[in-house]
Image (cartoon, grey):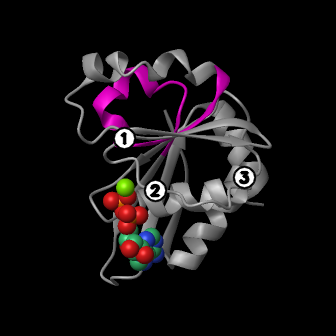
Amino acid sequence: MNNIASFQNLSLAELEKFAGKLAAILKTGDILALEGDLGAGKSAFARAALRALGISEDIPSPSFTLIQTYNTSCGQVLHCDFYRLSGETEVIGLGVFDQLADSIALIEWPGRSENLLKPQALWIKLDFTDDLDRRNLTLSGSHNWKARIESLCP
Ligand SMILES: Nc1ncnc2c1ncn2[C@@H]1O[C@H](COP(=O)(O)OP(=O)(O)O)[C@@H](O)[C@H]1O
Ligand SMILES: [Mg+2]
């Protein structure tokens, strides 16, 4: 995994804007692994990406359903939250891996199945800052992701 980019002290609007720009280059098979503590903004990031993909309906948290599925102009999008799963076996049991090749996946708490997702996903780590309303973002992933992200951030 390569360090791809980092952004410091993003406001919610800035984070949402970046999520929207990233969403615009996503294609079927892509996985965004959204890491960060509770309240860091993983769901906010996923919602902004889904909005940019044209979802105007309510976007509920997948904390309890574990997976929410959306049909978008870019195909099927899965919004997952693995927080309540204990590890790889339970994630596999959810059946989500069978769908990844045919979907764009936005996954909160991806560390539950880190090894399975690691090579393929773009890892987006959200960190709190001293300012309650700002977050640091750190992106890492494959060379392929690096090239795609660089095209986003000239
Ligand atoms: N710069 C920011 N980026 C993301 N969220 C922010 C920011 N500033 C404030 N927030 C707030 O923090 C909360 C993040 O919640 P949520 O996205 O549900 O977190 P998570 O899914 O990581 O547990 C939201 O209420 C959001 O409005
Ligand atoms: Mg969340």
Badge 1 vs badge 3, beta-carbon distance below 8 Å: no
Q: Position of residue 72 (x, y in %)?
A: 73, 43
What kind of residue is marked 3? Leu
Query: Alpha-carbon distance for marks 2 and 3?
Result: 16 Å
Q: Is residue 72 above or below residue 100?
A: below
- Residue 1 in the figure: left or right of residue 50: left
Give the magenta-colored segment's residue range: 102-123
Residue 57 in which image quadrant: bottom right
> Which residue has dot 1 on it?
65
Q: CA distance from mark 2 to mark 1?
A: 9 Å
Asked if the stretch drawn in magenta spans residue 106, the answer is yes
Cα distance in 3D space between marks 1 and 3:
21 Å
Residue 135 visible to the viewer? no
Residue annotated with mark 2: 60
Front in this rendered view, residue 143 or 17:
17
Which three-letter amino acid code belongs to the residue tagged 1? Thr
